[in-house]
């Protein structure tokens, strides 16, 4: 599903004549950890700790100078979660942003809800 979300995001970016985002495993690892922490109730749903996630990534990604993050939860497909992000002005701004790298993380809570995190880096 991570790849499917990135595919949907890149399809949308193509309609805006934007370059595709390259999925990076190390960014996906950070995104997955955040999704797991939200799904397990270790952190509240949202962007708490984003600065720390980005700081860890910036140490290993050369020339990185910008970042953003989208989160969502629910029983959504890849297409549905991206559609919801596009309907939200803030999330859409991140998707349309001047980024070239991304990572996607997904985790399932005990109640069946999925928690999604997508991190954008340039």
Image (cartoon, helix red, strand yellow):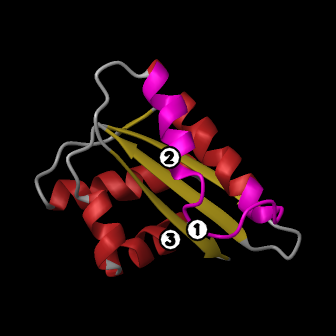
Tag 3 secondary structure: helix
Q: Is residue 38 magenta?
A: yes
Q: Position of residue 10 (x, y in %)?
A: 31, 51
- The reply to whether the magenta stretch includes residue 77 is no
Mark 1 / mark 3, whichever is N-terminal: 1
Say which residue appears at 29% left-offset and 56% top-offset.
Answer: 11
Q: Which residue is mark 3?
A: 81
Q: Is residue 19 left or right of residue 75?
A: left
Mark 2 or 1, closer to the camera: 2
The secondary structure type at the circle numbered 2 is helix
Is 86 left or right of 60, judged from the image as shown? left
Q: Earlier in the sequence, mark 2 or mark 1?
A: 1
Q: Residue at x 23, y 54 (%)?
A: 97
Q: Position of residue 78 (x, y in %)?
A: 53, 64
Per the image, label 1 sits on a secondary structure element best described as loop
Corner quadrant of residue 25: top right
Considering every residue shown, the one lying at the far left of the view is 17
Tell me the magenta residue range. 37-59
Specify the quadrant of the image occupied by residue 9. bottom left
Q: Which residue lies under the disc numbered 1? A: 46
Residue indicated by mark 2: 51
């Amino acid at each position: 599903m991570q790849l499917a979300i990135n595919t949907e995001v890149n399809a949308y970016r193509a309609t805006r004549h934007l370059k595709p985002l390259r999925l990076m495993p190390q960014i996906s690892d950070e995104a997955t950890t955040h999704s797991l922490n939200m799904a397990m109730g270790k952190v509240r749903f949202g962007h708490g700790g984003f600065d720390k996630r980005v700081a860890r990534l910036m140490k290993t990604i050369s020339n990185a100078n910008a970042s953003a993050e989208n989160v969502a939860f629910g029983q959504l497909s890849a297409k549905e979660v991206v559609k919801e992000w596009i309907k939200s002005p803030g999330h859409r701004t991140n998707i349309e942003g001047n980024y070239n790298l991304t990572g996607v993380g997904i985790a399932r809570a005990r109640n069946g809800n999925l928690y999604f995190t997508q991190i954008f880096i340039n």
